[in-house]
Amino acid sequence: MAQQAGEKSEVPTRELKGWVIPLLRLFAFSAFVSATVVMALNKQTKAFVVATIGSNPIKATLTAKFQHTPAFVFFVVANGVASIHNLLILAIQSIGRKYDFKVALVSAGASAAAFMGYLGRKGNSHARWNKICDKFDTFCDHGAGAMTASFIGLVLLMVLNVISIIKLQNRSSANCSSVP
């Protein structure tokens, strides 16, 4: 059937777009769970020779774990909360209600962890904080992977927020145009 001038075609995009938001939320959930689990299980123990008496080395064993840095603890908590929230939102959306998530908590947790990661990798000579990633390379690599997963989840949440804003804008412009 041909369209007449002035008519808008009704493309069945709602059926295609109906799965996009839950899929993005599922990917964000996966990223946050990955970040939480990797950082929460992140631990490395190394023995260092601190002195040598005669031919006998004296060793000290040091352990690096996420609980030693408040920023990493905040990172685990923030990503855990985001994981649970995304799981709840997926469950709520499956029964029909719609809510949105604010990205401030995850952004703060990921930023704090990124700062501590940078400090661990580079150190700060002015504050006399030595870098530790040259000694605890596995710990730092796992932390970097967790932060990467968290930032991927954060980007997905931002995309979800943009989609929500566009939907609200389209809904409000449709309501304004129908009012005489």
Image: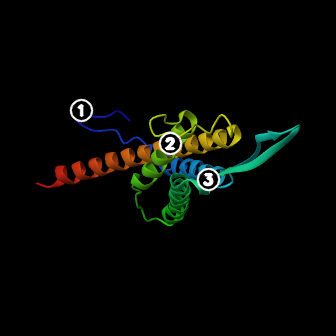
**Is 49 left or right of 24, judged from the image as shown?**
right
Question: What x and y, as percent, mark residue 88?
Answer: 52, 64
Q: Residue at x 52, y 56 (%)?
A: 70
Snapshot quadrant of residue 58: top right
Rendered position, 104 above or below 121: below
In this view, the mark in front (1 or 3): 3
**Is 171 left or right of 89, judged from the image as shown?**
left
Question: What x and y, as percent, mark residue 28?
Answer: 54, 49
* Residue indicated by mark 2: 114
* Residue indicated by mark 3: 66
Q: Residues within 10 Å of mark 3 (few under 14, many from 20)?
A: many
Q: Residues within 10 Å of mark 1 (few under 14, many from 20)?
A: few
Looking at this rendering, what residue extends furthest in the right direction? 55
Mark before the other along the chain sequence, 1 or 3? 1
Secondary structure found at label 3: helix
Rendered position, 13 above or below 80: above
The amino acid type found where label 2 is placed reads: Ala
Residue 38: which disc? none
Q: Residue at x 60, y 49 (%)?
A: 35
Mark before the other along the chain sequence, 3 or 2? 3
* Residue indicated by mark 1: 5
Question: What x and y, as percent, mark residue 56?
Answer: 87, 41
Distance between the alpha carbons at the discs numbered 1 and 3: 64 Å
